[in-house]
Image (cartoon, rainbow, N blue to C red):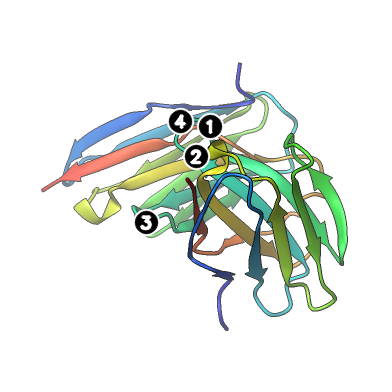
């Protein structure tokens, strides 16, 4: 069974641009969560989707948004990029909304210049 | 105060030593996760605990729900165990949201 995939793996953008990151969960997994990892703040929860519905959202500005499609693939979008958005963005998938092991993707490393 | 605290932040060991990493949390949880992150960023789930103790190879994880404390032990440590170990609290049922500790950077020398 293929693992969680994220595209692109690396991305360089400039301030003010927008970016869309993609996450394909393990086949059969219906829940996708997104996390941001920076050296200063560590790992922080962005949002969680289950069956195309946002179930939970972290403390991030409205510039950060996401969605989930009927095939459980998820995208996150960051508009009006700031230097501080430079980070590793990780997604994780689980079978459902109950207490299950989370499987992480390799991440997308975003650099904002 | 962070909702999930880990100690120590950094740990060095000689190959073969017994290692303990501690995690304390202040929130109600449905599960406590231990994760491993190697340079390059990939995160692997090691354990998910809601009570008691779990063992996988040389790794053992325990949790004390009353004291809101969990430990990760590595027996007979090896240089390939060098990584960052992160504990994460999963909150109320019905969400996969994780609250992370700051991580413990482990280096095992031959």
The answer to whether residue B92 is above or below residue A4 is: above
Chain assignment, label 4? B
* Label disc, if present, on residue B107 of the rendered structure: none
Residue topped by disc 3: B40
Residue topped by disc 1: A41
- For image coordinates 82% across by 72% down, the residue present is A69
Left or right, B76 with reference to A19: left
Q: CA distance from mark 2 to mark 4?
A: 22 Å
- For image coordinates 72% across by 28% down, the residue present is B27
Which secondary structure, mark 3? loop
The residue nearer to you, when weighing B24 against A104, is: A104
Residue topped by disc 4: B22
Give the number of the mark in front: 4 or 1.
1
Q: CA distance from mark 4 to mark 1?
A: 20 Å
Chain assignment, label 2? A
* Label disc, if present, on residue A38 of the rendered structure: 2
Q: Are marks 3 and 2 on the same chain?
A: no
Residue A43: % across, % down: 56, 40
Q: CA distance from mark 3 to mark 2?
A: 13 Å
Residue B18: % across, % down: 27, 39
Residue A102 shows in this picture = no
Chain assignment, label 3? B
Residue A31 location, quadrant = bottom right
Chain assignment, label 1? A
- For image coordinates 85% across by 76% down, the residue present is A70
């Amino acid at each position: 069974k293929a693992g969680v995939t994220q595209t692109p793996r690396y991305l360089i953008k400039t301030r003010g641009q927008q970016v869309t990151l993609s996450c394909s969960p393990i086949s059969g997994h219906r829940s996708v969560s997104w996390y941001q990892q920076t050296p200063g703040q560590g790992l922080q929860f962005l949002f969680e989707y289950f069956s195309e519905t946002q179930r939970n959202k972290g403390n991030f500005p409205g510039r950060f948004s996401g969605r989930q499609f009927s095939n459980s693939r998820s995208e996150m979008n960051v508009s009006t990029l700031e230097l501080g958005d430079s980070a590793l963005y990780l997604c994780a998938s689980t079978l459902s909304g109950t207490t299950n092991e989370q499987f992480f993707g390799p991440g997308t490393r975003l650099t904002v210049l | 105060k962070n909702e999930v605290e880990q100690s120590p932040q950094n740990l060095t060991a000689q190959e073969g030593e017994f290692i303990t990493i501690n995690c304390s949390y202040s929130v109600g949880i449905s599960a406590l996760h231990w994760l491993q992150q190697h340079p390059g960023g990939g995160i692997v789930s090691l354990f998910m605990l809601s009570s008691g103790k779990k063992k996988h190879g040389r790794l053992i994880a325990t949790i004390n729900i009353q004291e809101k404390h969990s430990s990760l032990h590595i027996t007979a440590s090896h240089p390939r165990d060098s990584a960052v170990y992160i504990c994460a609290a999963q909150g109320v049922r019905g969400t996969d949201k994780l609250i992370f500790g700051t991580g413990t950077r482990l280096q095992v020398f031959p």
